Amino acid sequence: MIEDSLIVFGKINYSEVSNRNYILNENEVGNYFRKFNISDSIDKTKINAKYDNGQLIVHLPKSEK
C-alpha cells in the first residue's frame, strides 16, 4: 500500500553536473528512487523532512500507542 510507504526520489540536471570541474568525485551521478516500508509503530501524521546543505534528513517519530 502507498499509505505504508515512504518514497524518496530525485532528478538531476545533467547539463549542470557535466559542466562541473571536480578534483575528486566519489559519488555516482544520476536520478534516484527509493521506497521504504513504514511500520505501524510510526506516527505517519508527524513525519517531517528537511534538505540542508546537500543532505536530506527524514524524521519518523514513533506512535504513542
Image (tube, rainbow, N blue to C red):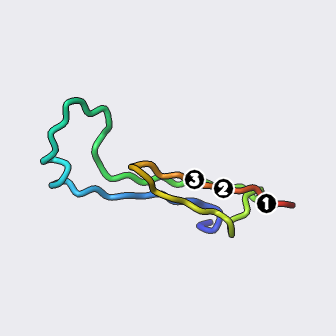
Of residue 17 and residue 5, the one placed in the foreground of this image is 17
Residue at point 44% right, 48% down?
55
Query: In the rendered view, would you say 40 is above or below 22?
Result: below
Q: Secondary structure at mark 2?
A: loop
Is 8 placed left or right of 15 in the picture?
Answer: right
Of residue 61 and residue 2, the one placed in the foreground of this image is 61
Give me the C-alpha separation between circle 2 and circle 1: 9 Å
Where is mark 2, residue-wise? 60
Where is mark 1, residue-wise? 63
* Label ID, residue 48: none
- Whether pointer 1 and pointer 3 mark residues with C-beta atoms closer than 8 Å, the reply is no
Check disc 1 and give the amino acid type: Ser
Q: Position of residue 7 (x, y in %)?
A: 51, 59
Query: In the rendered view, would you say 18 is above or below 39?
Result: above
Check disc 2 and give the amino acid type: Leu
Q: Residue furthest front?
A: 53
Q: Residue furthest left?
A: 19
Circle 1 or circle 3, nearest the eye: 1
Q: Position of residue 31 (x, y in %)?
A: 32, 53
* Label ID, residue 36: 3
